[in-house]
């Protein structure tokens, strides 16, 4: 969706910041056609994601859904769905894992409270907000595990309260502590154009 400024589309990538927003006002603007978040009382509107971002997102979402649905662990929700953490904080993680117990907190347009696990795929325009604002808020608000996927540096970092882990070998299994049985090899994320999520799901089960 294009954003017009003086009747001309804004060139991409762009990030727009609008001060003095609360959650009720945010809901008037938030919808599935535009990427926007409420971060510390600021409405942030971002340009559409890159192809690389979308391919990693699609692969990871498919892998998670196959695993979570197969084991009946809860629900996996993709981007354009809000996680309300306070009256001035309503981020849209790229992917959220919500346990069966926490599904009671689901509203029509948002999750009222923290997801158990969130996944953020960094891009040049979102990196600073994701790392410096959203990550600390996630941990302070009760998100138990955060995966930060950095395509620019080809690195994945997993955060828990007072601890984090970075892989050092692409062949190494990265394992979730809060999605039972879920794991992946970091190198999969950098080869999503040429691999099948179903094939890697079977490898994940067998490995």
Image (cartoon, rainbow, N blue to C red):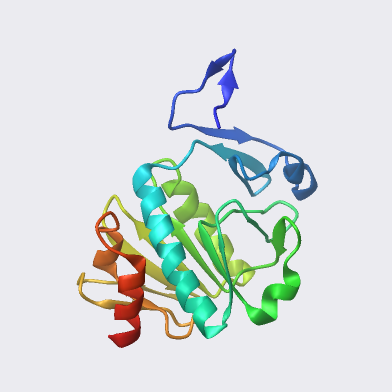
Residue 29: horizontal and vertical position, in percent?
A: 71, 39
Q: Nearer the viewer, residue 112 or 42?
A: 112
Q: Nearer the viewer, residue 122 or 196?
A: 196
Residue 57: horizontal and vertical position, in percent?
A: 42, 56
Residue 195: horizontal and vertical position, in percent?
A: 27, 62
Image quarter of the N terminus: top right
Q: Report how many numbered discs are placed on residues in the image.
A: 0
Which residue occupies 45% across, 24% down?
11
Which residue occupies 58% across, 61% down?
137
Image quarter of the C terminus: bottom left
Q: Horizontally, is 36 left or right of 193 in the view? A: right
Residue 107: horizontal and vertical position, in percent?
A: 76, 62
Q: Horizontally, is 134 left or right of 168 in the view? A: right
Q: Quadrant of residue 103?
A: bottom right
Q: Nearer the viewer, residue 99 or 42?
A: 99
Q: Is residue 79 above or below residue 162?
A: above
Q: Is residue 155 above or below residue 104?
A: above
Q: Quadrant of residue 72?
A: bottom right
């Amino acid at each position: 969706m294009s954003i017009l400024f003086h009747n001309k589309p804004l060139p991409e990538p762009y990030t727009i910041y609008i001060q003095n927003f609360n959650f009720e006002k945010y809901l008037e603007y938030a919808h599935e056609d535009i990427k926007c978040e409420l971060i510390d009382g600021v409405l942030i509107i971002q340009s559409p994601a890159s192809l690389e971002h979308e391919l990693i997102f699609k692969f990871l979402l498919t892998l998670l859904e196959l695993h979570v649905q197969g084991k009946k662990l809860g629900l996996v929700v993709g981007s354009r769905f809000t996680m309300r953490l306070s009256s001035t904080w309503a981020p849209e993680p790229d992917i959220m894992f919500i346990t069966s117990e926490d599904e009671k907190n689901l509203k029509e347009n948002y999750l009222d409270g923290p997801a158990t696990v969130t996944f953020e795929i960094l891009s040049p325009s979102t990196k600073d907000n994701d790392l410096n604002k959203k990550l600390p808020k996630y941990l302070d608000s009760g998100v138990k595990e955060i995966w930060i996927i950095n395509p620019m540096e080809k690195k994945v970092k997993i955060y828990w309260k007072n601890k984090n882990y970075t892989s050092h070998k692409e062949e190494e299994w990265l394992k979730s502590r809060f999605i039972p049985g879920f794991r992946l090899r970091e190198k999969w994320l950098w080869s999503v154009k040429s691999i099948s999520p179903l094939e890697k799901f079977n490898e994940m089960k067998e490995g």
